[in-house]
Amino acid sequence: MRITSVNRFRALVSGAKKTPAAVQNLERSDLPVNCTARGQEGPCSVNVAVKYSTINYKDALVATGNYAGLKFPMVGGIDLTGTVISDASGKFKEGDEIVVNSFGIGTDHFGGYAEEAMVRPEWVIPMPAGMSHLTAARIGTAGYTAALCVQALLEKKVTPDQGPIVVSGATGGVGSVSVVLLSQMGYEVTALSGKAEAEGEFLKSLGATTVLDRKDFEGKPRALNKELFAGGIDVAGGEILANILSMIKKYGTVSACGLASSMNLPTSVAPFILRGVTLAGIECVYLPLDRRVSAYNLLSEYCPADKLDLIGANDIIGLSAVPDIGKAMLAGQIKGRYVVDPSME
């Protein structure tokens, strides 16, 4: 792993709307000097030699030129692992191994799809003890978000003895890690998938007890349905989330972290005022570092390497492959996780 900057390095650059990103050579001067997060501007003082990034839904939108309001040019990659080259703030030293995700990298600021990155020190997490770059990349933003979703259920005291937990988008990044975490913690997991017949065995190998077809949750929702689940983790929104809410038992909780199906929520107040159901929104982009560290601790304990292997831990690709994988992801044709190595052709 090099920790010495070079004059030029490879990056995957999104240059125009509706146009796939392309690999280009950049120079250090192309990287951001200052970055704005939540309206607060600060220096991007940490220069990182990037080891790995991953492909998330936002990354797929950026890499295919479909991210709404994206300012061009942009280097995608909303998470990265790497080694510090230098840090003008003095918080980190050369050689420190670190993890960064969210805070707008890859969408508002150049991200992990490059051999080098510049980030703000307050965005950086020291690599968790005993965790490798590859493991951290396998987990990525999706796994980190899954951990936050599970933590929300724990905070509302949803326990395994109360009944199964339903997980939508179960073959995707957030869903697959959620299935692993919940099953390892003793929960019975019902996994929803648009590819239930084809992917049923895969999901059961991750720990799902039951696999249901997503289409059974896509119809017009009732205000209240039969109480089937103690809680849920949803990445879809829309009718899928509304149907899940209608099936949650009294005092259950649903963690909502995505809108892959729709931003709308066609439901009523019935689940909330007649059953005391909680809808816990998961905001992961600007979450304080202590909450992030807690999420990684949960992952360290309940996301074993053999399950990451099943999810796709060894699917390592180079920058040039990202746009095609992103296109397939947006079409719902991707199973599990991909790790991106910026040094690969």
Image (cartoon, rainbow, N blue to C red):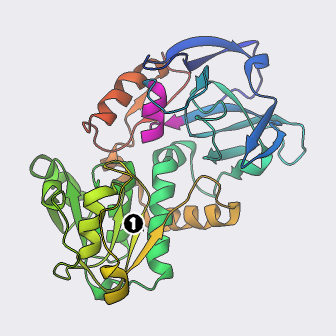
The residue lying at 20 percent from left, 66 percent from top is: 221
Q: Which residue is outermost to the left?
A: 197
289 is within the stretch colored magenta: no
In the rendered image, residue 156, in percent from the top left (x then y), is placed at 47, 83
The residue lying at 32 percent from left, 83 percent from top is: 160
In the rendered image, residue 230, in percent from the top left (x then y), is placed at 30, 81
The residue lying at 56 percent from left, 57 percent from top is: 284
344 sits left or right of 231 in the view: right
Give the answer, above or below, for where 270 lies relative to 306: below
68 sits left or right of 215 in the view: right
Residue linked to disc 1: 181
Q: Amino acid at mark 1?
A: Leu
In the rendered image, residue 167, in percent from the top left (x then y), is placed at 29, 63
61 is within the stretch colored magenta: yes
In the rendered image, residue 174, in percent from the top left (x then y), is placed at 39, 54
Front residue of this view, candidates 221 and 35: 221
Q: Secondary structure at mark 1?
A: helix
The residue lying at 49 percent from left, 68 percent from top is: 301
Residue range corresponding to the magenta coloring: 53-63
The quadrant in which the N terminus is found is top right
How many numbered marks are there?
A: 1
